[in-house]
Image (cartoon, rainbow, N blue to C red):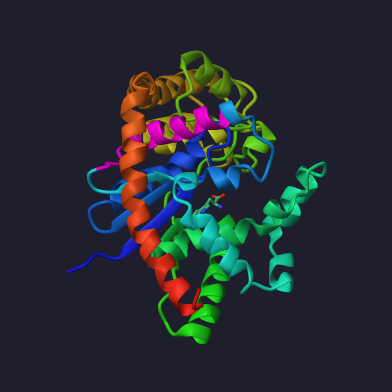
Amino acid sequence: MTKPIVFSGVQPSGELTIGNYLGALRNWVKLQDEYDCVFCVVDLHAITVRQDPAALRKATLDVLALYLACGIDPNKSTIFVQSHVPEHTQLSWVLNCYTYFGEMSRMTQFKDKSARYAENINVGLFDYPVLMAADILLYKADLVPVGEDQLAHLELTREIARRFNNFYGSFLTEPQAMLAKSARVPGTDARKMSKSYGNSVLLGENDDGIKKKVQEMYTDPLKIRKDDPGHPQGCVVFAFHKIFNENYKEREAECKAGSVGCVFCKRQLIDALSAFMKPLSEKRAELMGDKAYLEKIIKEGSRKARETAAETMSHIRKALKF
Ligand code: TRP
């Protein structure tokens, strides 16, 4: 029996955060046995904002190393780099011609990003969702694990697939979003964790970095003295304990009882986060030191991805009688 196909991607722009890990990578690892998974590093999407080419290349390898370090297994899943499979740009051109300006104008991510990058509102930034649709439709993905912020893009993908199928017969698969059920952590300042807010805890942060981030974390403003009873629910430190510390119930009880202060609680979190990051950082450093191995994974993965992509593109060419 063939397994349902899963496709997802991460942009190699800057470093991945703990949020990326909890919302994406950690779940992807678990999907690998049940589904036929295709995981992409979407470097073509990354150039919709200015990138230094050398830094982008390094970031691409780094995301790949993190995929592997987190447990994505190239023997089970296809792992590849978007720009290495030319069918992504080929299909996105075709899909452009089946996507309306009006529907694209409603995409909120474009509105946000064009406000943030006002000096470079390029057409690629506007067209970003169509390239994303091409990514997904090329592999006939059934399921796309994404965060809530990508649901509008996925709905657009479904609409484009439906439209194309109406014209030319059904051969594109309408994908379903697969929303991560996982716990989420806030940023250090209790807002949503986002690289643009500067409140992220990075994946692979070193000991000093972890210390600094935990020290920055907002705690319960009503717990001023060590023996004031605290309210763990609204506390950033506790949100992290809940995920990274198996003894979080103890921290919760102590906090509520006012038997320990926030400094102690933060120290406990520094230890828990360090224990979580250490093996990941070591594996990642080892992989980043073996570029030849990473290149081999990319080459092999992209070759495998291209087989499927080329087959879909050939159907499209036939449909259009090119
Ligand atoms: N737009 C996604 C994000 O910013 C990344 C992405 C590109 C993606 N292509 C994709 C995600 C295809 C899922 C499927 O998170």
Q: Is residue 226 visible?
A: no
Q: Whole-percent x and y of residue 140? A: 39, 67
Q: Choose between 256 and 166: the one closer to the eye.
A: 166
Above or below, comparing residue 263 to residue 187 in the picture: above
Direction from residue 62 to residue 119 in the image, left or right? right
Residue 199, x across and y down, in percent:
63, 32
In the image, residue 211 sits, relative to residue 303, either above or below, namely above
Q: Residue furthest top?
A: 208
255 or 245, which is in the foreground?
Answer: 245
**Furthest-front residue in this view:** 322
Q: Is residue 249 left or right of residue 153?
A: left
Instruction: Please state the horizontal and vertical placement of residue 3, each as a whole percent of the image.
Output: 24, 64
Give the image quarter of residue 46.
top right
Residue at 63%, 67% (x, y): give it.
Answer: 96
Q: Please, is residue 203 above or below residue 40 in the view? A: above
Tell me: 245 left or right of 9: left
Q: At x 68% / y 55%, what residue is drawn?
A: 109
Quadrant for the N terminus, please: bottom left
Instruction: For residue 263, say whether it is visible.
Output: yes
Q: For the magenta stretch, what is the residue range?
A: 55-74
Q: Is residue 243 magenta?
A: no
Most common SS among magenta residues: helix
Asked which quadrant contains residue 221, the reply is: top right
Residue 20, image x and y in percent?
49, 41
Q: Is residue 124 left or right of residue 38?
A: right
| Residue 100 figure quarter | bottom right
Residue in the picture at 40% in, 21% down:
274
Q: How many marks?
A: 0
Viewer-proximal residue, 56 or 182? 56
Q: Residue furthest left?
A: 1
Asked whether residue 73 is drawn in magenta, I would say yes
